[in-house]
Amino acid sequence: MNRFRDAFCEHVGCRPEDYLREALRQTLHPHAALLGGLARRLCSPLCEQLLEDAGETTTGEELRDVIRLYEYDVHWHGGFWVRRLKFRVSGQRLLNLHGELRQRVGKNNLPAAIPGTRPVPATSG
């Protein structure tokens, strides 16, 4: 099975070295994404670690475990910008992205959809 990173890069048409930047752009909380590069600078190393770890997952359960660890770390180590103002990756957006990739890329490339995830609305551009 493909890793999440591989399926994501194939889906968005980015190079593997651009995975972090592109995945961060698509999974930041919406208000943080509006700030573009500033949000990326304010987003803690916790966000980058989450996306690195998520990129290596091959099953939905692995992805959920990575998100649970991230949420724990945000709670205890996130700081004001990350915890209170939500300048961070949205775990739900990451789960939704996984579901979207599952539907578009196909069964052979990603694990079964994660129960309880909501479909991602189609976006233009």
Image (cartoon, rainbow, N blue to C red):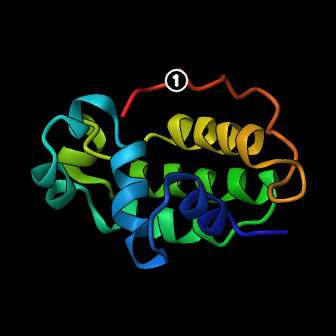
Residue 100 higher or lower than 38, as above or below: above
Query: Which residue sits at x=37%, y=54%?
Result: 24
Number of marks in the rendered image? 1
Q: Quadrant of residue 48?
A: bottom left
Residue 80 occupies quadrant: top left
Q: Nearer the viewer, residue 61 or 14?
A: 14
Judge the density around disc 1: few (<14), some (14-19), many (≥20) Cα neighbours within 10 Å. Answer: few
Q: Which residue is mark 1?
A: 122
The location of residue 45, given as percent across then percent down, is 32, 68
Percent x, y for residue 52? Answer: 51, 71
Q: Amino acid at mark 1?
A: Ala
Rendered residue at 52%/23% (across/down): 122
Who is closer to the viewer here, 99 or 80? 99
Of 34 and 53, the residue lying toward us? 34
Q: Secondary structure at mark 1?
A: loop
Q: Where is 70 relative to 116, above or below?
A: below
Quadrant of the image containing the N terminus: bottom right
Q: Residue at x 79, y 39 (%)?
A: 114
- Up the image or down, 48 lies above or below 70; here it is below
Q: Quadrant of the C terminus?
A: top left
